[in-house]
Amino acid sequence: MYSSRLGQLPPYLFARIDELKEEQERKGVDIIDLGIGDPDLPTPPHIVEALCVAARDPANHHYPSYVGMGAFRQAVSAWYRGRFQVSLDPNREVIALMGSKDGIAHIPEAFINPGDYVLVPDPGYPVYRTSTLFAEGRVYTMPLTASNHFLPELDRIPSRVVKKAKLMFLNYPNNPTATVAPPSFFREVVEFAEDHRIIVVHDNAYSEVSFDGYCAPSFLETPGAMEVGVEMHSLSKTYNMTGWRIGMACGNTEILGGLKRVKTNVDSGVFNAVQHAGIAALTGSQECIRQSCRIYQERRDALVHGLRDMGMECPLPSATFYVWAPVENGVAFATRLLEEVGVVAAPGVGFGECGKQYIRFAITRSLERIQEAIDRIRRLR
Ligand SMILES: *Cc1c(COP(=O)(O)O)cnc(C)c1O
């Protein structure tokens, strides 16, 4: 019944964990879910208020513009200038997205012919792979390992692949490894992309979730980046707005043009009231971001130190709300965590083969619950 395209998709690797979780819940186990990357903190009130006001205005009840309201694109442009010193023409270098997933899921369709390669980090956000397969592209996985500091080794990609590669996905600060990229890596990427005419799609969903004074760059800050790439960004993680579905694609006009042509045929834009809320988020006080980061940092410290105390080797991430911990077998460990002590964490293999010996904890639960999770994990070992 289903298309062969659907048949090509990798199995959903969290299905088993989801099943086990439901089973435990049915038994009445008090589950601590550190599995999903969805902030537990609420959207700041001034953003919610802007939505309420805009939702009452009939002017906002019509089809939105495909590329987003001018005022939203201007707010994005001003935010990029203030935050990254990147200058973007709101009319040509910004389009609104229904979350960054929208941009990631649709961009290969604009550029990939059957058989073209897409360079995809492994482990990585699963949509890079599935969007490539939907466009009938071939996935070439770039391993992210501790030994390469979780950065793709571009010079190790075989030249037969590089020749047929049309697009590359990157994501720093990175989900699931919680690592960051030095500016020198982005410079290397721009040079590689120029040399081999490869479109770079940088996913910057976590630029605002960082600790200990670390400040994540935009890929577009890199000299030459505007010629070779685009950045997918999102208000989801920055302002605790995952449910609202709003983000933006910024960068090279021609590349954005391809994405825009796909999108005009599959969706009809972001509800204007949500865009008004997005403007309130981007132009209002950014104190809410610092507040969220302080909360995450406290949780991160509790989890990482707790895991280290029981002998787990676990780096202290300087960005994202994940902790990526090496274990002997991620699936076996996640299963034991869930069955024996009611803690959900994501087995790393769900993000790719190279994640097999890892487990990802999301610190999107309160400090008390994280401390409780540590107490439980201690019992396990
Ligand atoms: C959460 C996430 C996204 C998607 O975010 P939305 O803007 O809500 O669609 C994209 N990429 C990565 C790496 C993520 O973790």
Image (cartoon, helix red, strand yellow):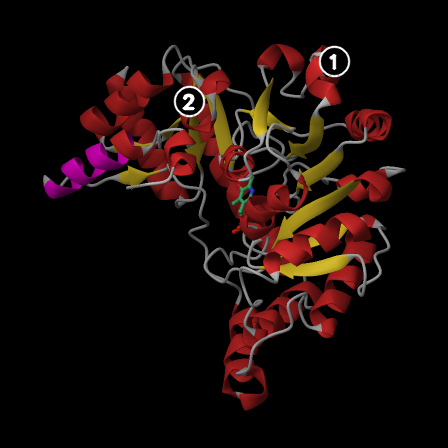
Q: Is residue 96 above or below residue 119?
A: below
Between 344 and 202, the one lying in front of the other is 202
Magenta range: 17-26
The percent coordinates of residue 69 (x first, y second) are 68, 72
The residue positioned farthest toward the bottom in the image shown: 58
Q: Main secondary structure of the magenta part?
A: helix
Q: Quadrant of the C terminus?
A: top left
- For the residues labelled 2 and 1, the Cα–Cα distance comes to 27 Å
Residue denoted by label 2: 349
In reply to whether residue 23 is colored magenta, the answer given is yes
Work out whether residue 339 can be spotted. yes
Position of residue 201 measured from the top left corner of the image (x, y, whole percent): 69, 39
Residue name at image x 56 percent, y 77 percent: 63
The reply to whether residue 248 is visible in this rendering is no
In the image, residue 57 above or below residue 298: below
Q: Tell whether circle 1 marks a residue whose Cβ is less than 8 angstroms from ligand 1.
A: no
Please state the horizontal and vertical placement of residue 131, each as a whole percent of the image. 53, 39
In this figure, which residue is indicated by the disc labeled 1? 159
Question: Callout 1: helix, strand or loop?
Answer: helix
Residue at left offset 61%, top offset 70%: 275
Determine the image quadrant of residue 308: top left
- The secondary structure type at the circle numbered 2 is helix
Is 37 on the left-hand or right-hand side of 271?
A: left
The amino acid type found where label 2 is placed reads Val
Give above or below for 71 relative to 61.
above
Quarter of the figure with the N terminus: top left
**Mark sitting on residue 228:** none
Which tag, 2 or 1, sits closer to the chain's start? 1
**What is the quadrant of residue 124 in the picture?**
top right
